[in-house]
Image (cartoon, rainbow, N blue to C red):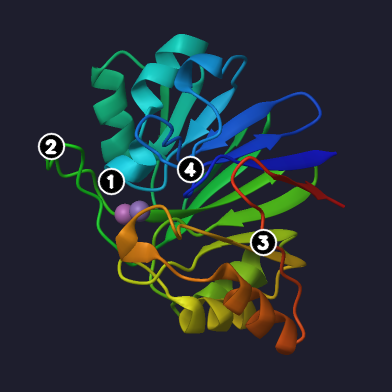
Amino acid sequence: MVTLRFHGHSCWEIQGAAHRILIDPFLTGNPQADVARADVTALDAILVSHGHSDHLGDTVALAKQTGAVVIANYEIATYCAQRGCTIHPLHIGGGATFPFGHVRLTIAHHGSTGPEGEALGNPAGIVLVIDGKRLYHAGDTAVFLDMQLIAELYGPLDVALLPIGDNFTMGITEAVKATELLCARMHIPMHYNTFPYIEVNPEAFRRAVEAAGRKVVVIPPGGEYVVP
Ligand code: NI
Ligand code: MN
């Protein structure tokens, strides 16, 4: 059984049968976060989509606190290694197998500077396969036609986690198009209502995706989705 717990913004905790993974662990300073950094224990890996502080977040502190390996693009991984973390660098298009499953970085159209403007490579999306479930975390991105390729090569996707907050990423219209390109078994919105810039109504996304005949569920911060 694979459970996805939403800690707000783009932070997802993936709980498999024997492993726990955190994606984009923005807890400190995240007004939606339902857990504090100190509450996080027994973590196997931290996956980071890009260097922006609302995604890199607590990565360095959490990796050192838990011993989790940081998996991200080469520049982010190196940044974390220089700060004392155990890392595994990847880059876009590449993937690797880990004790908990498989991680591949995919393209994303966005930026990736670090907390103090460091050049932290290119932003990525993440395809994670764990316990036979195929998950896609889009990171921060515009919609792009190559999402079809992600579905074709790495699908069928069980879950697609998609930003809908507009302004910095896809808005609802674009995210609905993304569901058409990805055709996941379930689509879940993220990266909205954390800050004034990205206030949108997730129910509008839900209605539009359902009207298009695809599956969607809105998970509130602190909520979870069990992959069937
Ligand atoms: Ni960003
Ligand atoms: Mn962001």
Tell me the residue that label 3 is attached to. Answer: 218
Q: Earlier in the sequence, mark 1 or mark 2?
A: 1
Residue 52 place in picture, x, y as percent = 28, 46
Instruction: Answer above or below: position of 68 versus 197.
Output: above
| Mark toward the start of the polypeptide (4 vs 3) | 4
Q: Nearer the viewer, residue 92 or 83?
A: 83
* Numbered badge on residue 116: 2
Marks 1 and 3 sit apart, C-alpha to C-alpha, by 24 Å
Q: Name the secondary structure under disc 2.
A: loop
For residue 31, side relative to residue 210 (left or right): left
Of the residues tagged 4 and 1, which is closer to the observer? 4
**Amino acid at circle 2:** Glu
Earlier-in-chain disc, 4 versus 2: 4
Q: Quadrant of residue 150?
A: bottom right
The Cα–Cα distance between marks 4 and 3, rounded to whole angstroms, is: 14 Å
* Mark 4, residue position: 32
Q: Is mark 1 within 8 Å of ligand 1?
A: yes
Circle 1/circle 2 CB separation < 8 Å: no
Q: Position of residue 83 (x, y in %)?
A: 26, 17
Q: Nearer the viewer, mark 1 or mark 3?
A: 3
Q: Tell which of 192 and 128 is nearer to you.
A: 192
Residue 80: where, in percent of width, then height? 30, 25
Q: Which residue is mark 1?
A: 52
Q: CA distance from mark 1 to mark 2?
A: 9 Å
Q: Amino acid at mark 4?
A: Gln
Query: Element under label 4?
Result: loop
**Apparent side of residue 202 relative to residue 113 in the rendered image (left or right):** right
Tell me the kind of residue under disc 3: Val
Kind of element beneath mark 3: loop
